[in-house]
Image (spheres, grey):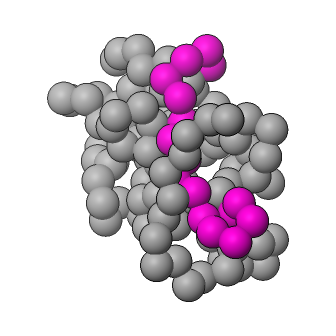
Amino acid sequence: MTEHAVHTDHAHVHGPDCGHEAIVHDDHTDYLHEGHLHHVHGDHVDEHVVEVAGPNADDCTPGHECADHGQAHVHGPDCGHDEVPHGEHTDYLAGGHLHHPHGEHCDDHGPLVTV
C-alpha cells in the first residue's frame, strides 16, 4: 500500500460540477483547488503532486513561447492561472501545460490533460 497525504478539514465536495479544474493524473481524476491537487479517496481527500518524470520533467526551456500568454506575462499566485504542485515546486497551468517561472523566462514542464 502506498502512503498518501490526507488533506484535513476539507468540507468542499469535488466532482464534475464543483467549479475546480479537473485533470487526469496517473489513472484517475484530481482537482486543482487553491494551489493543491486534490484526489477524492473514499471518505477523505488526498493531496497529490505531479511527479517530475517523463513528459513532466523540470527542464530549463528558455526558448519556450506559449500561445496562451505573451512573454511579458509573469506567473505567480495572482497571475490568473491555476497553481499546480509539481515535485517540490509550484507550476502554473496555462494552455494545457505546466509553466514554471525561471529568471527572465518561463519553462515548459510538460503537458497536463484536463477533463
Image side of residue 48 versus residue 39, left or right: left
Tell me if I can see residue 69 in this picture: no
Q: In the image shown, does 28 or 54 lie closer to the viewer?
A: 28
Where is residue 57 shown, x and y percent of the image?
A: 50, 18
Where residue 19 sits in the image (x, y, percent)?
66, 77
Q: Nearer the viewer, residue 43 or 23?
A: 43
- Residue 75 sits above or below residue 82 on the image: above
The residue that appears at 41% across and 15% down in the rendered structure is: 59
Residue name at image x 46 percent, y 71 percent: 8
Q: Is residue 61 magenta?
A: no
Q: Is residue 60 visible?
A: yes
Measured as percent of width and height from the top left, residue 70 is found at 41, 43
Question: In this orientation, which residue lies closer to the viewer: 31 or 74?
Answer: 31
Name above or below for residue 54 compared with residue 47. Answer: above
Q: Which residues are magenta?
A: 40-55
The C terminus, quarter of image: bottom right
Outermost residue to the bottom:
11
